[in-house]
Amino acid sequence: MSESIQPSTPEGAATAVAETILEMRSITKTFPGVMALKDVSLDVRPGEIHAICGENGAGKSTLMKVLSGVYPHGTYEGEIVFEGTPVQFRGIRDSEHHGIVIIHQELALSPYLSIAENIFLGNERSTRGVIDWNKTNSDAAKLLAEVGLSESPDTKIYDIGVGKQQLVEIAKAMAKRVKLLILDEPTAALNDEDSAKLLTLIQSLRERGITSIIISHKLNEILRVADRTTVIRDGQTIKTFDMRVETVTEEDLIRAMVGRSMDHRFPERTPNIGTEVLRIEDWTVHHPIQQERRVVDNASLYVRRGEVVGLAGLMGAGRTELAMSIFGRTYGTNISGKVFKDGQEVSTHTVGAAIDSGIAYATEDRKRYGLNLLTDIKRNIAAASLRKVSKYGVVDAGAESNVASKFRSDMNIKAPSVDVLTGNLSGGNQQKVVLSKWIFTDADVLILDEPTRGIDVGAKYEIYTIINSLAAAGKAIIMISSELPELLGMCDRIYAISEGRVTGEVPREQATQENLMRYMTMVSDDKEVTR
Amino acid sequence: MTTLKDTLGGNLRQYGIVGALGVIVVLFQILTDGKLLLPNNVASLIQQNAYVMILALGMIIVIIAGHIDLSAGSVVGFVGAFVAVLMREQSWPWWLAIVGAIVIGMLVGAWQGFWVAYVGVPAFIVTLAGWLAFRGLAILILGGKTIASFPQEFVAISNKSIANFLGWLGGSRDTVTIVLGAVVVAALILSQLRARRTLRKHELHVEPVSGLLIKLVLFSLLIGYFTFVLAGSRGGTPIVLIIIGALVVTYSFITQKTVFGRNVYAMGGNLQAAILSGVNTKRMNFMIFVNMGMLAAIAGIVTTSKAGAASALAGQGYELDAIASCFIGGTSVYGGIGRVSGVIVGALIMGVLNMGLSIIGTDPAWQQVIKGLVLLAAVAFDLVNKRRSGALVR
């Protein structure tokens, strides 16, 4: 399958060191029921910037976790060779000891400690357990100068922005004498200016002989800084591009990222689309903490009866934030815009009001936001519509059980009875309970956020069938998914979202992974990138 | 037999704690040479521990919802002082003073609920502040004195029994108590049969007849024996037992059958999911504390009545007894899990320990040590049990 470009030209690197600093050979990693990585190989040359790209869930982060020892040796198959010798990491400390440092997407800094304290966290400048503050601060100052951050080492982390925090992370890595720096989506939370600065820094690290692996969704950034790029799809290496010997375009990367055949993974459906049910106009939402940041930016969309509408976007594009801000303002601050239901403007200020307007939102993370795992199926199903099974504030347990039992058979929830705790169900069955709960509210519009995440293939098909039958019953469905084939297979219309803005609206006939990906990676005023 | 085991298995924790209560009762029955279960001792066990059960009924709701109330004991003292002043200095009739006390208790709850629900201050902090403030207010109201000499009716609440208007059965057993016991057994059997019939009607899973029978016979015997003992006490059924009984039934109903109760469990089980299901969590939190304040007021009335006097130090440490009862009774420290029946058993364990240890003349310092260890053992047992059965979600 992999057709990496073989003739390698180590240009610039005049040193006669080993040709690769890192080789990962035939890495296979399985989780219960899922094969996350299948026979993945990766080679990284010393002093290069190597980008890894692929769709959400393709296996990029898993591969990096294998490399950094988050998944220790023995939990995966395959071999890792670093600087010419096979290595077996038992944990992050092991890999860091060898000079491999990973910076995760969610920064791992302690907000109430100073920059200097964070840089040397777990790696303190001390003698016999007593910290040498002079050395800590002076060493930190040197590292800060190297990464180009002009802040005092005493500054607390919560006083500096995300962009500067990212630089602190890099300084922290350098304090560990990093040889191979792994950055997972380093610019995802940064604005353009900070992103540009960070990329320049990574390039300057290259001049100093530090090798970097960058995982990124932003193709323009990859094209700007990467020397080589490996594309991963469905847990397999697809192709390695060498940007120094060939001209690579975003199109080339996109094709490699999505090029997969569509088989019969989706049930047939003949859409019967009626009148408009929900319309969102000029919806703008600000970040709850960084209040000047627009997470959803002037978004407008609509959905009709019997229609399945998709929201496509990369991680952090603002899809979930859009949905949650509409649903009872459960996300964001300073929200503006209008919601129309059946042509009438409605208020969705509280979750109760949203439910009363006939809107339902099944959350992305079932366990954290969707279910009470401590209680049984029937109580979970009734949780959002207790009024329908109670009188004068007293719950009619019999009616509740009946409703739940009906859902259990209709939705094929595999459990011996409705008295089973939802914590004991499989992911697919938990999802069916969540869907039952929202269907029971009699909503006209169901917003389903990643309805098939973490669910095995068979159960996915069942969920698709349920979604189709809801549409056939005249419900309007908004489906948020990170899997493009799923959106293409299920939706009548797809909105692409990037940086909180609706960047494209594509009807089913015209939708392809390539054109969606183009809209999804569309960045505001694409700055001319310079090398 | 497997089906019987299945029914029992689901409630193993519940049965385990009842078993522990049984063991403790038998142990002290032996250690006290049979004095523990003497009729008068049983009656005073109830009268002395009424406050724990009343507070625990509010506390369990607070804890299931994921909060804690440290102020309950201080509120007991504050309300006790208040009701004493109303009766003695304002000359209110005793019944009106009680109504006033309950209202002030609810206002106290509203005050604390406001900070928890609408300002978002953690309940631990709000009620720690209340623990200090209401104790201080109790001292201020009483002005350092102890107020006593209450109307007879008021003192009777915690010290007297239901009048013996039906005479004596077999010479020494109070007929009223026997009748009440019979009513309770009949109600138990009827409610179980009704619940079973509803389940049948909805074609739901019912436990096997053998299981139900064993359960009913066991509980009927237990209640029967308890009734028999109590009927032999000096006065028969303590008035406060009726109050507790009514509250227990009410709160079992509220927690298990009402939308309010359901939402309490939903909030404790997964707050985010509850919010996203449309539960008005702010109003719920407010109501939960108003309810707690009301029960603290009732406990304050009962305590003041028992002592026959209001002192500024009344109710000290009561909140901890109530919290301990909840945890011994299987309420989850993280919220979301707990039952009124379990908490009552937990409160009885604390009560029997108190009573038994004082009958055998244990040093109060050692009593505290023992109660502390029992609390620790009960919760540790619970955790180990859950971990073994793989039911520990967090």
Image (spheres, grey):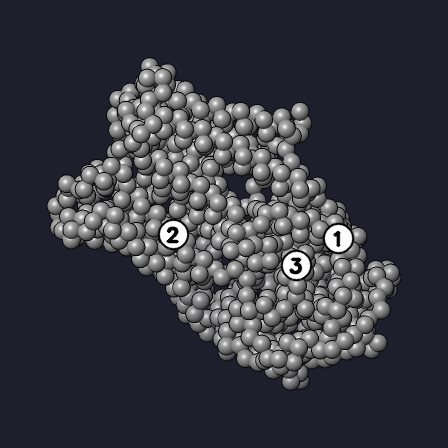
Please tell me how crowded label 2 is: few (under 14), some (14-19), or many (20+) other residues with Cα within 10 Å. many
Subunit under mark 1: A
Subunit under mark 3: A
Between residue B322 and residue A390, name the one nearer to us.
A390
Q: CA distance from mark 3 to mark 2?
A: 31 Å
Residue at position x 67%, y 44% in the image: B202
**SS label for mark 2:** helix
> Mark 2 — residue?
B291
Q: Position of residue B201 (x, y in %)?
A: 66, 42
Residue at position x 44%, y 48% in the image: B61
Sequence-wise, which precedes: disc 3 or disc 1? Answer: 1
Between residue A474 and residue A13, name the one nearer to us.
A474
Q: Position of residue B233 (x, y in %)?
A: 31, 23
> Looking at the rendered structure, which numbered label has been put on residue A410?
1
Residue at position x 45%, y 32% in the image: B184
Kindly indicate whether the residues beneath marks 3 and 1 are on one polypeptide chain: yes
Q: Label 1 amino acid? A: Asp
Q: Are marks 1 and 2 in contact (CB under 8 Å)?
A: no
> Mark 3 — residue?
A440
Q: Label 2 amino acid? A: Asn
